[in-house]
Structures are given as structure tokens and as C-alpha cells.
Image (spheres, rainbow, N blue to C red):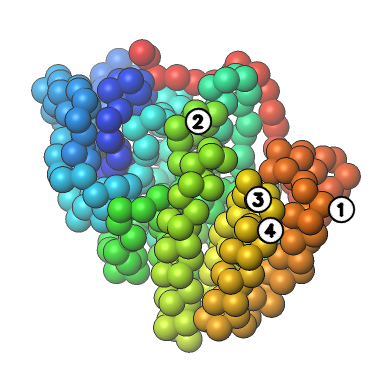
Amino acid sequence: MEKLVTFAVAAYDSENYLKTCLNSFLILDSSQELQEKRFEVLIINDGSKDKTEEIAFSYQKKYPEIFRVKTKVNGGHGSVINYAVKQAAGKYFKVIDADDWIEKEQLSNYLDRLEQTNAEVVLTHYKTFHIKTGEVIGWKTFLEDYKKEYTLFDIQKNWKSMDRCLTFHGITYRTDFYRQKGIRLEEGVFYEDHQYATIPCCYAAHIQPLDCSLYCYRIGDKEQSVSEKNQYLRRNHIQIVIVSMCRYWKARKSRMGDAGRFYYKEKLSRLILSYLVIVLLSSPIHLDGRIEAREFIKQIRIDSMEIYQKIRIRYGILICCNYWKITLEQYQKILKSPIYNRLRRNKNFQSEKGKVSYGDR
């Protein structure tokens, strides 16, 4: 029997987090039996050197109908997704990082809704949990009707009501659609999740948002790829992903619909701006940051003038911030300020402390 969804857990040296992640999938139905028939958890051990593989196999042994373990040579996050989607047995496919988890009280609702749709893309809310401060922020779509399916044209018209969940953490793909429309993600680098959340989705005909918060994304760890330090040290990884996405845009944009092109340009321009923020505001020497940014922008103008036109004003603002020696922390405070968000007409996301669902440790 086909599983409804395959959750692919990307695991590398995750012995300190993996149990929390895997326990979050152990949900009971009304008869107190595990809902093992509806989904599978495919644990991809990406060449770990610690006890990740041992822990993964212990779950497979105890719950063989839920957990399935595959071990491969280390190749990075993108290689895990490339490998996992070929192995997936579920109608739908969702990737979970081993240091994150699923909110188990929402999982049954998520599965019920998946049974009722055939959309190529399913969107769910998600939460971030800051391990240092305990702050929880819920990121969601702002829609009146969660029963109807949406199109990319609907997303274009309601971008700020939906954009925060059009991400790695919010997207579930129908497996056959991803296999057909996806690409081989960049391997051996970080930040390839931008390709994952952009390229298949820009071809979707039917998108089904769900009014449930499924994914809990753990943040605040200085070793994470999204920390300021690591983003600056690995900024060449972001460059590699951007260059790859620019080449794809140049080669394939004529095959996308108008709304698909809108979606791709929005996602790519945001990635480019995030790179510029890191280079211009985190560089120890401000002049070096400007030189690097200008060389990069020259290439963007060569690759795609229309992408450059979309970011040029924000690029100019970031250059000014660099001259004024505004730090990344100061810049982020500006972005979070009520005045800025009112001017930008951004949606308000709820913040709370301590209210977060863990898997059992």
C-alpha cells in the first residue's frame, strides 16, 4: 500500500538531536495505536561519524512500519534530498532536518488534509524556536479560505499573505511532481534549499495551503549554517546557488507562465539580497565588502538585467548602510521595527516564549 507521505530526515552527526526529531512522529490514533500505515520516515544518514546511524537503526528495529534507514557517503544537504526523493514511497514528500521536529499534535490533521487533495504543492505554517531565548515565532499564511486550492496567479496577487511559507520549512511536494519538475540540487554546499523551494514550485498548477503549523525549526545555534558567522564564512556557497539559479532562469524562463516567472524572480531576488546583506554588513572591512558586492552585481547584470532591475534600489540602500557602518544586528532591528513593517505593509507574526511542542526526549 502506498504511503500518504514520506518524511525524509536529513541526518549528519545528529546524535544529540535525532531522538527528539524521530519521537515527534510517534503519534497515536483514537484507539491508541500508532498511525504507521499513513506515512513513513526515511532517515538518510549522510556519512555520519557519531552515533546517528546507531540511533536511526534502533528506531527502524522498534517501529519498522514507520522508519526506514539509508546510509550514504557524505555529500551534504542537497545530496540527501537528491537521494531521498528517489527512495520515497509516499504520494507526498517533505524534508525534515534532524535537529528540527514535527509538532505531533498537528500531524494527524496534516495527514487528514493530505488525503483530501491532489495538489502538486501543499503549504503549512511553521514555527521557529530560539534555543537561547526560548522565543517561539509562528510563521503562517494569512488566508480566509483554507479549503480552496490556489494557483501561482493567486500567490502573485496575495504575495505577502503567503510568501513566508513558500520555503523549505513550509512546502510539501507531491512526489511525482517533484521528480518531474525538480532538478538535481547543488551538492557539497549549503543554502541549496532555495533551489528546492523555488524551481519545482514555479511550475505548480495547484497549491493547497493548510491551516496547521507542522514544522518546528530550531534556531540560535552558532554552528548552524544560518548563523551570521557561518553565512559570512560560507558566502561562496550562496554565490554557487545564486549562479546556478541564474543560469536556470536564463535557460528556462520562457517555459514558465507569467505567474511562475513572478514567483521565480521574487525568490531569486530575495536570495541575492540576503547575500548582499551578509557581504556588506558582516564584512570585517567595509571597503572589502563593497568591492566584493560590486563585482558580484556586475555578474548579475550580465546574467540577467531584469533580476538586477528588481534588486537595484535595495542594493543601493545596502551600499549606503555599508558606508554608514550599520551592523547586521542594527539592520535586523530596523527590519523588525513597527514603522518599517507598516510602511512595507508586512504581516504581523506572533511571538511567544516557551510555548513549543517537542518530541519526547
Q: Amino acid at mark 4?
A: Leu
Side of 296 where 105 appears, left or right: left
Q: Amino acid at mark 2?
A: Lys
Side of 223 where 301 appears, left or right: right
Q: Between disc 2 and disc 1, whose residue precedes?
A: 2
Side of 314 where 118 appears, left or right: left
**Do tag 4 and tag 3 residues touch (Cβ < 8 Å)?**
yes
How far apart marks 1 and 4 lie (CA) works out to: 31 Å
Number of numbered discs: 4
Residue 94 coordinates in the image, percent (x, y): 36, 46
Mark 4 crowdedness (10 Å alpha carbons): few <14, some 14-19, many ≥20:
few
Q: Which residue is mark 4?
A: 287
Q: Between disc 1 and disc 4, whose residue precedes?
A: 4
Q: Which residue is mark 3?
A: 285
Q: Is residue 74 above or below residue 62?
A: below
How far apart marks 2 and 4 lie (CA) works out to: 26 Å
**Do tag 1 and tag 4 residues touch (Cβ < 8 Å)?**
no
Q: Could you tell me which quadrant the N terminus lies in?
A: top left
Q: Amino acid at mark 1?
A: Leu
Can you see residue 277?
Answer: no
Residue at 22% from the left image edge and 41% from the top image edge: 46
How far apart marks 2 and 1 lie (CA) works out to: 32 Å
**Tag on residue 222?**
2
Q: Is residue 72 above or below residue 14?
A: below
